[in-house]
Image (cartoon, grey):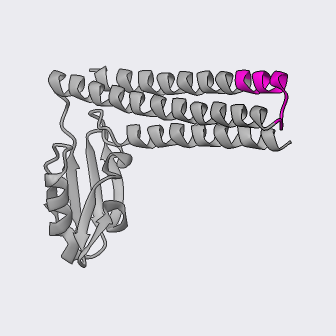
């Protein structure tokens, strides 16, 4: 029973790695406006680095425009500065207490660059999954050596862990393929 829980622990770690990848991919700009593309932007307000979504309400005005309804008018210039300085290549326009952010179309070079970034994310997460598998295999070998499980049980659990690893690698590849298609779509 304890081993099943241990394999579940490795599965939950793999799930965390996949969730992390999905979150990271959502922040990569694809040429269409979506609120999650601003998730990593921090604004310095009241002497603190604060996520931009905690400074105002972010919305999508149209497929090419985001808007931020800033709650405190004193923070508008800080939001504008953070958006301009981000690596998203944004040029915000202040309209009263609303900051409008036109999302420019991506150039072909930028699309290819973003595709490379996506592939780097993929490799990072695949390595993470493989490290989790390695830790699991080391655990099973130690359990077998300590006579807590038989050789047959160790082989079966190792096989199950490998199947789990293969499943999560395929999920990562699927998410990466989706994101690349989204980026390269003109």
User: Is the stretch drawn in magenta largely helix, strand or loop?
Assistant: helix
Residue 73 sits inside the magenta stretch = no
Quarter occupied by the C terminus: top left
Task: Residue 177 in the image: state x and y as whole percent.
Answer: 43, 21
Of residues 15 and 36, the one drawn nearer to the viewer in this rendering: 15
Q: Is residue 67 left or right of residue 9?
A: left
Tell me the residue at 66%/27% (across/down).
164
Corner quadrant of residue 98? bottom left
Tell me the residue at 76%/37% (across/down).
143
The answer to whether any part of residue 96 appears in the image is: no
Quarter occupied by the N terminus: top right
Tell me the residue at 21%/43% (across/down).
88
Tell me the residue at 21%/63% (across/down).
79
Of residues 51 and 12, the one drawn nearer to the viewer in this rendering: 12
Q: Is residue 71 left or right of residue 141?
A: left
Task: Residue 25 in the image: state x and y as whole percent.
Answer: 39, 37
Residue 156 sits inside the magenta stretch = yes
Tally of numbered tags = 0
Task: Residue 70 in the image: state x and y as whole percent.
Answer: 28, 68
Q: Is residue 167 left or right of residue 150?
A: left
First to last magenta residue range: 147-159
Q: Is residue 68 above or below residue 158?
A: below
Q: Is residue 112 above or below residue 134?
A: above
Task: Residue 35 in the image: state x and y as whole percent.
Answer: 36, 49
Of residues 37 and 147, the one drawn nearer to the viewer in this rendering: 147
Q: Is residue 82 above or below residue 133?
A: below
């Amino acid at each position: 029973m304890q081993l099943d829980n241990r394999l579940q622990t490795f599965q939950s770690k793999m799930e965390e790695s996949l969730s992390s990848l999905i979150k990271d991919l959502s922040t990569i700009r694809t040429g269409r406006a979506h609120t999650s593309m601003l998730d990593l932007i921090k604004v310095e307000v009241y002497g603190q680095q604060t996520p931009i979504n905690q400074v105002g309400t972010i919305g999508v005005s149209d497929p090419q425009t985001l808007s931020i309804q800033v709650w405190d008018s004193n923070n508008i210039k800080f939001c504008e500065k953070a958006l301009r300085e981000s690596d998203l290549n944004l040029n915000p326009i202040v309209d009263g207490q609303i900051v409008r952010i036109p999302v420019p179309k991506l150039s072909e070079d930028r699309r290819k660059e973003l595709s490379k970034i996506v592939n780097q994310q993929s490799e990072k997460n695949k390595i993470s999954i493989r490290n989790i598998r390695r830790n699991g295999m080391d655990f099973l070998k130690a359990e077998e050596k300590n006579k807590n499980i038989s050789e047959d049980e160790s082989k079966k659990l190792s096989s199950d862990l490998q199947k789990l690893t293969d499943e999560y690698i395929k999920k990562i590849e699927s998410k990466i393929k989706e994101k690349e298609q989204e980026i390269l779509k003109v």
